[in-house]
Amino acid sequence: MPKKTPYPLLFVSNPGPHNTVLNWHNVPEREFCFYARAFHTAAKTLVENLDLDRTPRSDWNACPVVFLYRHALELHLKALILGDGGKFLASKPDPASIYRTHCLRRLAQVVCEIVKAVGWKGSFTCEGVTGLGDFRAVVNDLDSVDPGSHAFRYPVNTAGEGSVQSHLTFSVLEFARQMNAILDLLDVTADALAATWDMQTEAAALEAELHGGNDFEPTIH
């Protein structure tokens, strides 16, 4: 009997050179930012290559765009909280709880608490967002349309009802422009928080060394 040709392995443990290698850090919770940037890049690429808001009956092309942006937003919020951002809070968020939730407004509330804790309310701005109030409003609007990250992936929800409310109308290009600004803001904020934490840690370590102490905790001034 002739041997059957084995199916090729699409995902392997030890890929060769020039292949995509996922989770190479072996610290998956630290890779939220990389996933967030990847989905953001995919969303921007899709918008640039689709004739959105112009061609009749191209309405459904908006679904993958919104899904990619929504997922990128969720990942960026989680990256900021699970990264160095959460360290600035008196009560650190439970990682398992953050992993499980898809609620954007809940994640945004934690991010707002972090921004307030470091005293950056006045600088947390971008195009279309003049402060934390505007930021929460945009996030809450998207969360109300798609509270469980489900609406733009399937035509029906788990109850068999329409995922998207009847005759939902919006400008995909305007939506993408606003989301690009917010995602970029979250990305640079996460980097700034990491740099701030490192500086405070180094300063606390130096102070402890000068005073002959070994235990220290970075503080927010």
Image (spheres, rainbow, N blue to C red):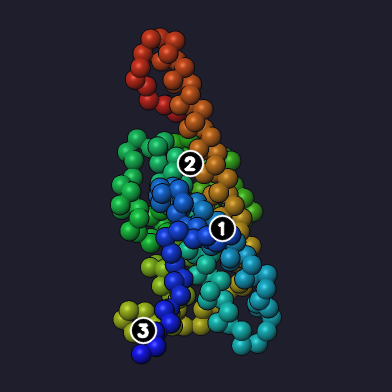
Q: Assess whether mark 2 and mark 3 are in contact (beta carbons under 8 angstroms).
A: no
Q: Secondary structure at mark 1?
A: loop
Marks 3/2: CA distance?
Answer: 38 Å
Question: Around disc 2, counting alpha carbons within 10 Å, would you say few (fewer than 14), some (14 to 19), or many (20 or more)?
Answer: many
| Badge count | 3
Q: Which residue is mark 2?
A: 115
| Mark-to-mark CA distance, 2 and 1 | 41 Å
Q: Position of residue 26 (x, y in %)?
A: 41, 49
Disc ID at residue 199: none
Q: Is residue 48 left or right of residue 113?
A: right
Q: Earlier in the sequence, mark 2 or mark 1?
A: 1
Residue 34 x/y as whole percent: 51, 53
Query: Is residue 13 depicted above or below 130 in this figure?
Result: below
Q: Residues within 10 Å of mark 1 (few under 14, many from 20)?
A: few
Tell me which amino acid carries mark 3: Glu
Task: Give residue 90's position: percent from left, percent from top.
Answer: 35, 35
The image shows residue 95 at horizontal and vertical percentages of 33, 48
Tell me the SS state at disc 3.
loop
Residue 109 appears in the figure: no
Q: Nearer the viewer, mark 2 or mark 1?
A: 1
* Up/down of 114 relative to 77, above or below: above
| Residue at 44 percent of width and 67 percent of height | 11
Q: Amino acid at mark 2?
A: Val
Give the residue number, with chain letter if any, for mark 3.
Answer: 161
Image quadrant of residue 189? Answer: top right
Query: Residue extending furthest bottom?
Result: 1
Residue at 44% over, 20% down: 205
**Mark 1 — residue?**
17
